[in-house]
Amino acid sequence: MKGGDCVFELLKKAVALGLGAIDLSESKIRELVDDLVKRGEIKKSEGAKLIDEILKKAGKSRTEIEKKVQEGIRGALQKVDLVQKKDLNAAVKNLEKKIEQLKKKVEKE
């Protein structure tokens, strides 16, 4: 296997596994691929294809990781029995309403 093929396959495998691509910015990805093209390790058309593939898979991986993190956070919050902001706001409004009712009742007496 030629050096360029090895690098190309290594990059594809890393992307397939979602390793490293998440933290790479688009400009850094382009820079790395452009460097491979300049060194003649991959063709320019392969470089463009590789950039698109990396960006798509990185976006997918990022979305999946964000979803899993959000699910994990929700699960952890449920386990510690914290009140969600919307529920707290509803309870505060309910208490404010009751306070107003009591004020009116006291004023009538």
Image (spheres, rainbow, N blue to C red):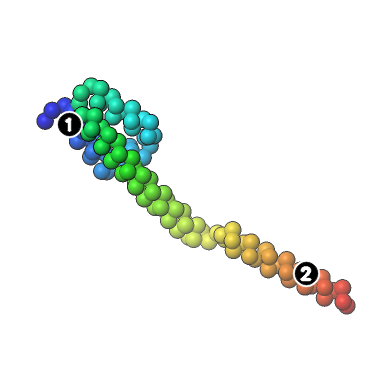
Is residue 72 something that shows in the picture?
A: no
> Which of the two residues, 58 or 90, is positioned nearer the viewer here?
58
From the viewer's perspective, is 78 left or right of 98?
left
Residue 105 as seen in the image, left or right of residue 80: right
What's the CA distance linking mark 1 and mark 2?
A: 74 Å
Label 1 environment density (alpha carbons within 10 Å; few <14, some 14–19, many ≥20): few
Q: Earlier in the sequence, mark 1 or mark 2?
A: 1
The quadrant in which residue 51 appears is top left
Q: Give the image location of residue 40, x and y in percent.
A: 20, 23
Q: Please tell me which residue is depicted at 20% across the width and 29% down the height of the picture.
A: 43
Q: Is residue 22 above or below residue 36?
A: below
* Disc assigned to residue 28: none
Residue beneath disc 1? 6
**Residue 100: which numbered mark, if any?**
2
> Answer yes or no: do the residues labelled 1 and 2 have beta carbons within 8 Å?
no
Going by the image, does 86 lie left or right of 7?
right
Residue 95 x %, y %: 70, 67
| Residue 9 pos. (x, y %) | 19, 36
Amino acid carrying mark 2 in the image: Glu
Where disc 1 sits, the SS reads helix
Which residue in the rendered view is the most extreme toward the left?
1
Q: Nearer the viewer, residue 62 or 37?
A: 37
Task: Name the residue: 82% across, 70% down.
Answer: 103
Q: Amino acid at mark 1?
A: Cys
Q: Residue furthest front?
A: 45
| Residue lying at 13% horizontally and 28% vertically, measured from the top left | 2
Which of the two marks, 1 or 2, is nearer to us in this view? 1
